[in-house]
Image (cartoon, coloured by chain):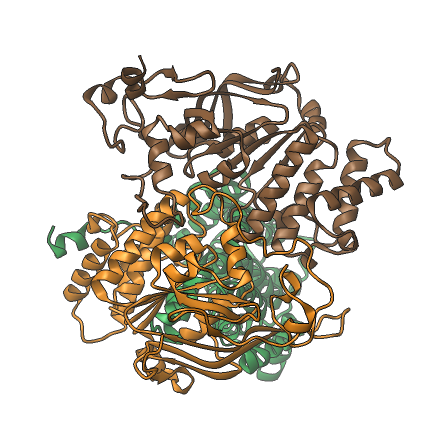
Amino acid sequence: MKNTEIAMTRNRPYWRQALDENWRRLRRNPTGRSGLILLLIFALMAASSFIPPLISPIYNPMHGVDPHISHTTGPSLRHWLGTDFIGRDIFSQLLAGARVAFMVGITAAFMSVVLGVAIGILAGYAGGWADTVLMRLADMIMVMPTLLVVLMAAALFGQLSIWTIVAMIALFRWPGVSRVIRARILSLKQRPFIEAARIAGASHLRIMTRHLLPNVLPLALLYMTFRVTSAIIIEAALAFLGFGDPTTVSWGMMLQWVWKTGHMFQAPYWLLPPGICISLLTLSFYMLARAMDEILDPRLRRRGES
Amino acid sequence: MQSLLEVKDLTVSYTTPAGKILAVDRVSFQLEAGRSLGLVGESGSGKSTIGTAILGLLADNARVETGAIVFEGHNLLEADQETLRRLRWKKISMIFQAAMNALNPIMPVGDQIVEAIRVHEPEVPLTAARQRVADLFRQVGIPARRLRDYPHQYSGGMRQRAIIAMALACNPRVIIADEPTTALDVIVQDRILKTIIRLQDRFDIGILLISHDISVTAEVCHQIGVMYAGQLVEIGTKEEILTTPAHPYTRALLEAHITLSNDRQPAPVPGPAADLHRLPEGCRFHGRCRRPDANCRRQTPSWHSLSATHKVLCREAESNGN
Amino acid sequence: METDSRKDAIVLAGVTRLYRSGSRLLTARQKTIRALDEVDLNIPPGCIFGLVGESGSGKTTAARLMVRLEKPDSGTVSVLGRDMAGLHGKHLRRFRRKIQMIFQDPYQSLNPYQSVISIVSEPLSLRRQMTKDQRLDKVLETLALVGLDPPSTYLHRYPHQLSGGQRQRVAIARAMVLDPQVLIADEPTSMLDASIAVQIYRLMLKIQHRSKVTMVFITHNLAAANYLCDHIAVIYRGRILEIGPSGSVINSPCHPYTQALLDALPRFGHIWKERRFDTMLDEPRSDIPQNGCVFYSRCSKAEYSTCRRQPVLKSAGRDHKAACFLI
């Protein structure tokens, strides 16, 4: 066989096989399946959030005011979930909110996990003073209440944009991830295959990226799913308390508008949809993470600390 | 002699993602009191599955397809979980490979065995149980002062001996030892095997010793059974198996053994290990056999007796024997 | 082995390695274990050298020092004429390619997320001068050498798709792909079936025959050491007790510990039908002298008055030395 042909007959990489296998198990797991279905509904909502403004400018979630309405109204054919206090369509706001929730949740979780994994691998592999310094830093950040710190930052610097909020959530939520990753690295780095790589002449960077990283990726993915939930909740809380990005329609922001205009107990059609959406979306990510945990755990335990 | 434990026509299957496999295929043997039988074979030959089937500890994806395991007149395969649970340790006990996992790290070793006795024989008073454990420790060669030590204070060999003491705690009739000395070094292995030999002489216990190393079974056992790809292919007394092996696989195993003598060069068993998912037609060993003939590919071999105690599952024996 | 020590492949000179067990919260005293105690050892090039002892004897520590996974507390470890302690960073990485190692457990020594091609070509990819095609050729050649045939069918498999014996062959291929001058094998068959072990031993003999690599074979089994090695050193509690050509050590063992190791081998295929020496006590002695012979506590022949000092290696035949007062 020619060399080029050999290169062509390549199997799928092991991580792809493992991913496919776990994906199959996730879909068979009842919790995982419910989480996935819920998530799919929200993903559809987020994807279709572009449609209402195309139908008519009055369905723009931020600026589209129905010219015939100047106060909040209940559900109708024209406005399926009614309108808010200046006549904006609640349904299109809900769809836009789904998009924002996904964006905030996934970006913040992704950033915090990337940071946490990088620091966890570095601390666990390097050991010594680097480990001590990084982990003490992690401890310090871990005990700071994220919401309070972001609130104070908002109070100090005025309005925060949605991306600043995302960055701050990421910056405060990595320590938990890095602790778990570091613990795993500590056991992994004792394994002969890491020593074999050292003897083969691999540099530290190569050992960290090529040998350690793939072995902690499933764990990182699991933590990312858990982090999505907390990021969405933090953003919603910030927006509800009035420190959100005023140029973005998020579910938290919608709740804030309900509250600020005094419609808490007058307009259930306005209050309930964003509230229910926040709960269900976080629930779906949580169920997904729990199912992943169940799937990954026995495998981690079997391979684990010997 | 009345047999203590009889395995009759046992077939165990596993359901795996790649399909159903027969890990144990129609295996029969008898174990007598005060005697020991060694089961030898490569990993995947089904030898450990037989041990777990006797103890009623088969994995979730395993299923007994046919056969019977008769102990003291009862078929264990028809017994309910509660009966099996009571039999285990008390009548049929086990010695496993992973000695560390079998001991509770936060409890002194002596207390653990006292506890095991009191769980299975609640009528035994505490002092009597303690006395019994002290006797057992002496018999397996652990100094009595080590009774109060924790597992991590024991060496690997001593832990394995503590496991043997635990297995003997309730005066069982049968002991199943699955690779009891694998991963231990030669001196410790020697000690453990000596202990096992002494115990079977003294207590009239039937021992089923499972090992991949034919020299280990030869050291301890009166009888040796050789397993290949789920089947028992040859069984006989130790002398018969070592001096007049009849199955080509047994001969290959003996030749593959590294020994001290320089005049005999070890030869590896040829060919790849049997794949239970793709078993060949005819004799399962024909692909690795040194002298297969055309019929070995087509015909399933049948048992042939070479003596009252020695039989083999091979066509070659048929042509030579009759 | 009265060879010129400058030419020796590996030289350990007065090597001591201590392990300190971490001070526990409850038992405050800290224990120091001498894994290796003032060990001198010369391993000539181009031979297979056996280091034999039970677990805890220090044999694995010696191996780890030779590839510099650890550093000695005192003494020097020189490999191919270079003091390993003086090598750092890039120089160490470059030098390490000449000294490769095979580990005990092939289930732990291969990265589960790497395919065979990735495992075996990794040491090569760290050498920049090779083109991708050259690398692939080298990988295929090495896989064929270790008996994974046809090599191309193994390239894209993952460790979990291989048997224990095949994994160990991949590990050997990873070690051999760099054409090392020294290969250290730390109990390479202890996790494998007895019938597979022979295949690995034969492979090691074949490799040594072809490449003239200096091999250090670490084992607890004198029969395996006898089969593979030209020279054997028997090590116990960090000290070398007997050293010499294999035939001489096996056929006329001098040290009671070597004799005990031979006695302990199963009778099947043994050169002696019965136990011959009975030098190992079942119950260790309690009157252990300070700085005495390390084997004193378990030796049936020892006498307190003679053995309370530390014996040195003395000649017991041609190239054959033993550290015992009783010879």
- Front position in the image: A248 or B116: B116
- Front position in the image: C294 or A281: C294
Residue B118: x %, y % from top left: 81, 36
B181 lies left or right of C131? right
- Front position in the image: A256 or C202: C202
The answer to whether residue C274 is above or below residue A148 is above
Residue C267 shows up from this direction: yes
Q: Give the residue at x 16% y 69%.
A: C131
Residue A9: x %, y % from top left: 20, 49
The colour one sees for chain B in the rendered image is brown
Q: Give the residue at x 29% y 66%.
A: C122
Q: How many marks can you see? A: 0
Residue C231 picture quarter: bottom left
Q: Give the residue at x 61% y 48%.
A: B99
Residue A15: x %, y % from top left: 37, 53
C186 lies left or right of B197? left
Chain letter of the orange region? C
The colour one sees for chain A in the rendered image is green
Instruction: Farthest residue to the bottom: give it.
Output: C86
- Front position in the image: B142 or B244: B244
Residue A37: x %, y % from top left: 48, 42
The C terminus of chain A appears in which quarter of the rendering?
Answer: bottom right
The answer to whether residue B215 is above or below residue C185 is above
The answer to whether residue C163 is above or below residue B39 is below
Residue A87 shows up from this direction: no
Instruction: Farthest residue to the left: give it.
Output: A2
C123 lies left or right of A218? left
